[in-house]
Amino acid sequence: MSEGEEMLIVQKYGGTSVADLEKIRNVARRVARYRDEGHDLVVVVSAMAGETDRLLSLAHEITPEPSPRELDMLVSTGEQVTASLLAITLQTMGYPAEALLGYQIPILTNELFTRARIQDIKTERLKAILSQGKVAVVAGFQGVTENGDITTLGRGGSDTTAVALAAALKADLCEIFTDVEGVYTADPRIVAKARKIPKLSYEEMLELASAGAKVLEIRAVEFAMVYKVPIHVRSTFSEAPGTIITEEDEDMEKVLVSGVTYNRNEARISLYGVPDVPGVAAKIFSPIAERGILVDMIIQTARTDGKADLTFTVPRTNLREALKIIEEVAREIGAERVEGDENIAKVSIVGAGMRTHSGVASKMFETLAKHGVNIMMISTSEIKVSCVIEEKYTELAVRALHEAFGLDIPPEEEK
């Protein structure tokens, strides 16, 4: 943010940033400082920390499988409360503000309840509010279908709301405020010597998010990359600069590995004795795709009896639903059996420098082998290598890889 330069800024504050009234007042004071500098502001808020889980648990006390439509009606109320409270707080401080829900903007989505995707955003009402000198406070995480049904964008969806609004409004900057000071080379709770990364490319952040980094939701990064929205990830509780996520430059390519990340929300499904004929893969994965369940790694092993074994990963939260679908498909195609495994995790290394350096994957495999960590599945991209391992080895693997690729804070820089 250049001093004296007035900008249109979209900010997003996560659940820990608005966890109680005092924290909401703290957010309001920060917003007020931006207004005093002359910036136009759209502020996207999450529900108070723990509120979405509380609402979900109420629904699941009634039934193990509540209607997805009614769940969206229920959990969207968390953001409504926060948006209203922040607007009221700003008003009492003398800063005009107006709270809006997703349907009032409107943020139009498809009808895939609990994990809807944004299809269009109408900006006229937001622009009118900003032109009146008001702060627009938007309830994150939610949208509306063409039929008027409330939808939610999935966990972490407030990030997506913020970046999508920044793209639609052609904002100068999107700031994501959270409880950490930026994106780190690894989870600081696991790796004490993790370092804050000053700048990442969209592609690196996309790979980190897809591999399990919790700082930014993956669809938010996709929006930012497509619409070239610069993102600044920073702490609500500090004035320190965070991590800038922007287009790749030459300096980024010099770094071999930018970060090590992990994802424990992984489950593995294996089908044994699948007929090895054309069209079978489509029969297996089409019904899973229709339910909006993401499939990550896929490995197929041919056998000598004209059959194959197929293993793939899905989010652990979708395992029960995916197993039900796959067991039905297995009966239809004559597969031998289906197995599910929740005791896995995915560890990944990410870095733009991998494009121009060889030997990165082999170094990862050697490091894991040295520490007695068995690799079950492997996937790669130009700038990422991921391995599925037993969940109990997650922290060991992350620490070992962080050290092996020279990401630890040097002893002379330790506090």
Image: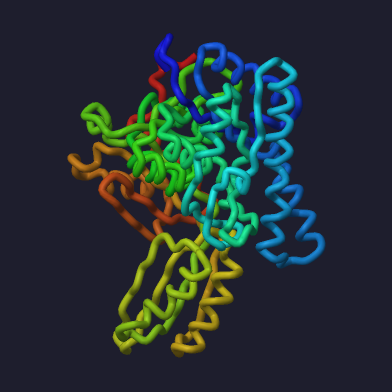
Camera-nearest residue between 318 and 130? 130
Residue 388, by quadrant, is bottom left
Q: Quadrant of the N terminus?
A: top left
Q: Give residue 101's position: percent from left, percent from top.
A: 64, 43
* Residue 397 in view (yes/no): no
Whether residue 32 is situated above or below residue 145 in the rendered picture:
above
Q: Is residue 16 visible?
A: yes
- The answer to whether 166 appears left or right of 366 in the picture is right
Which quadrant would residue 405 be assigned to in this image?
Answer: top left
Q: Is residue 257 above or below residue 289?
A: above
Q: Is residue 83 above or below residue 90?
A: below
Residue at the farthest right position: 62
Residue at image coords 44%, 80%: 272
Residue 66 spot, x, y in % from top left = 72, 65
Relative side of 95 to 256, left or right: right
Residue toward you, 72 or 5: 5
Left or right: residue 333 compared with residue 316? left
Where is residue 359 shown, x and y percent of the image? 22, 45
- Vertical order, 142 against 250 (above or below): below
- Relative placement, left or right, of 131 versus 356 is right
Asked which colour scheme the image uses, the reply is rainbow
Where residue 51 appears, x then y in whole percent?
73, 43
Residue for point 40% across, 46% down:
222
- Residue ID at (53%, 26%): 131
